[in-house]
Image (spheres, helix red, strand yellow):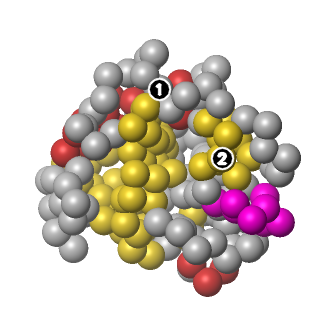
């Protein structure tokens, strides 16, 4: 582990010498081999950060490689979808979630390489790092931070930054 790694457990996170409160999935942290779609669990292991999305009407880009979301952007969470665990557009016939939500939860999203880019059906769709609903409130399996903390972290991520989730 290095200071550039985001290290997360059920008690919080550590990044660049600072500690942050965070949320994990309602199903707790599970071994990656046990992760399944819809279980609400956060998979333990080492994951790369492969993308950063932001809602351009609500946030300025925290890094020069961040991409804006659009109202039609979605993320497939349907194991039967050929585009499972990939970004899709509105009108997609399979189950998906909106990337521009009415609440601020997805105003900033760090995308991890969990079950990506060649998704194995049923292993679980995206593990995002996003804004929590409220302090320590469980997610559906993602990692949640306070908005200010997430923006601070996002601005300092480097190519070699990893998300390390420990059980």
Q: Is residue 144 left or right of residue 78?
A: left
Q: Earlier in the sequence, mark 1 or mark 2?
A: 1
Answer above or below: position of 86 versus 108: below
The image shows residue 101 at horizontal and vertical percentages of: 63, 27
Tell me the CA gap for discs 1 and 2. Answer: 16 Å
Considering every residue shown, the one lying at the far top of the view is 57
Image coords of residue 151 (percent x, y): 31, 34
Q: Which residue in the structure is indicated by mark 1? A: 55
Q: Secondary structure at mark 2?
A: strand
Query: Is 80 one of the magenta-colored residues?
Result: yes
Indicate whether residue 70 is drawn in magenta.
no
Say if 39 sits above or below 151 in the image. below
> Residue sitting at 14 percent across and 53 percent down?
17
Question: Percent position (x, y) of residue 114?
Answer: 52, 67
Residue 47 falls in which quadrant of the image?
A: bottom left
Residues shaded magenta: 78-85
- State the residue in front, 56 or 45: 56
Q: Secondary structure at mark 1?
A: loop
Residue 131, relative to residue 16: is it above or below? Answer: above
Tell me what residue is drawn at x 40 percent, y 51 percent.
51
For disc 2, the marked residue is 88
The kind of secondary structure the magenta stretch mainly shows is loop
């Amino acid at each position: 582990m290095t200071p550039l790694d985001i290290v997360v457990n059920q008690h919080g996170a550590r990044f660049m010498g600072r500690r942050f409160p965070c949320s994990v999935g309602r199903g707790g942290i599970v071994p990656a081999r046990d992760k399944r779609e819809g279980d609400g669990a956060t998979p333990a292991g080492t994951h790369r950060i492969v993308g950063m999305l932001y809602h351009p009407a609500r946030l300025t880009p925290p890094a020069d490689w961040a991409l804006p979301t659009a109202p039609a952007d979605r993320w497939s969470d349907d194991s039967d979808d050929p585009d499972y665990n990939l970004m899709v557009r509105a009108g997609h016939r399979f189950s998906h979630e909106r990337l521009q939500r009415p609440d601020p939860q997805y105003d900033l999203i760090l995308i991890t390489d969990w079950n990506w880019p060649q998704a194995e059906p049923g292993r679980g769709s995206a593990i995002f790092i996003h804004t929590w609903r409220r302090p320590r409130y469980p997610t559906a399996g993602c990692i949640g931070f306070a908005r200010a903390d997430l923006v601070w972290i996002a601005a300092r991520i480097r190519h070699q930054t990893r998300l390390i989730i420990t059980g």
